Amino acid sequence: MNNPKPFLDQLSTGVMIFSLDGDGTWRVSECNPALDGIREGSAAELNGKQTKDFIQVDAKTNAPFCQGKPFKPLEKLPIHTALFETASQQWVRVKVKYDWLDEKTILFWVEPFSEDMALTQAHADFVSTVSHEFRTPLTSIKGFADTLLRYGANLDTEQQKRFITIIKHQADRLTRLVENLLTVSKLGAQKTQFIFRPIPLKRTVERIVQSVEGKLPEPRVFKINIPEDLPEVWADPDKLEQVLLNLIDNAAKYSYPDSEVRVKAQLHPEDNDKIKIDIEDQGVGIPEEHLPNIFNKFSRIDNPLTREVEGTGLGLYITKSLTNAMGGQIFVQSENKKGTTFTVVLPVATPERQAAARLKDEEEAL
């Protein structure tokens, strides 16, 4: 192989050379100067590393080289998008292309993901995800409805009840999908209206837990630890309920049967003007590589308890957006196979906040 370095150094596109070492591992052997700009630091620090050390690819993407999946020498590798880690440990979206120099050497092209490309990709993701999410429940509804119409007279009462229950469950799933899409649309257009009020947190959580318990196919143990004298939260009641319902429902869904889901709240240890709410499960945890993207649109995680990819990937995006819009913050900590804790921080319903809200309402009424 001729030395391509002088040629690569002149390119404005970021390029790495990957070489196959003796143990069959592809590692970076060379980086060009243009990659420094994308990485926002010296790309030479990547020499000797594998893609898993600085590249993240969505599980739905066909990217065998980055995903460590098998491929043949000189095989045409697909162009795809990925997240590229910068020197400051931030993640930027890039487009990745490949060219073979020989059977043991690959040119790895990295291009910043432009706004037009991002919109095109987001649109494609949206259509693909929503089409799949609509198709699955609609197929079930149609299948069981057809069965009831054709053979209903031959089915006993229990079978009919089971089929109708499945139809209702899938119809509820469609309703949630439509509601999530409408919420995302309103958030994007900044048309979501918030009506802030003092909210007693313990009663709200108890009502949500009761609702979640009634839908679970297998039991969970819910532990609520919220002091009776905890100050009220300053939030929109409907939006707060949506945030907590998403998190508590996820905690139950990703937990092992008979395990505990704990919801606790307290005044924030570092700021008594805020309330800290923890939703903790003893479940499967979130893989470390998913944590940077957990609140992104269409971020979906495989659930080892069901072997399914859960939902539309909009729930946590909506949860974070609503939390931020109510003046709060949300954080996540997780350990594989040991559980996950989501922490929501929201303002206390202080007399000052309530007075300011009343004044604003009076001004708008004039």
Image (spheres, grey):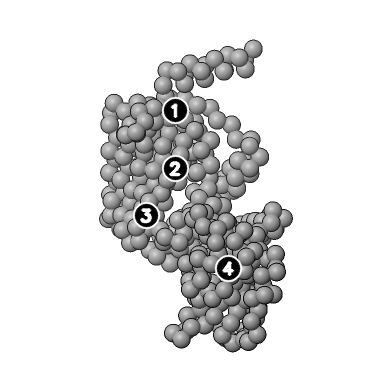
Image: 120 above or below 264: below
Residue 334: mark: 3
Residue 30 point in image, percent of width and height: 57, 73
Does 51 sit left or right of 348 as displayed?
right
Q: Label 4's element? A: loop
Locate residue 307, reporting x and y percent.
Answer: 43, 67
Name the side, left or right, on which 197 lies relative to 114.
Answer: left
Identified by mark 2, the residue type is Ile
What residue would you read off at disc 1? 234
The residue closer to the viewer here, 147 or 212, is 212
Query: Is mark 1 in CB contact (under 8 Å) with mark 3?
Result: no
Work out whether residue 294 can be spotted: yes
The residue pinned by badge 2 equals: 330
Frontmost of labels 1 and 3 is: 3
Mark in front: 2 vs 1: 2
Residue flagged by tag 4: what amino acid is it? Thr
Mark 3 nearby-residue class (10 Å; few <14, some 14–19, many ≥20)? many
**Left or right of 268 in this view: 40:** right
Gap in Å between the C-alphas at discs 2 and 1? Answer: 15 Å
- How far apart marks 4 and 2 lie (CA) works out to 28 Å
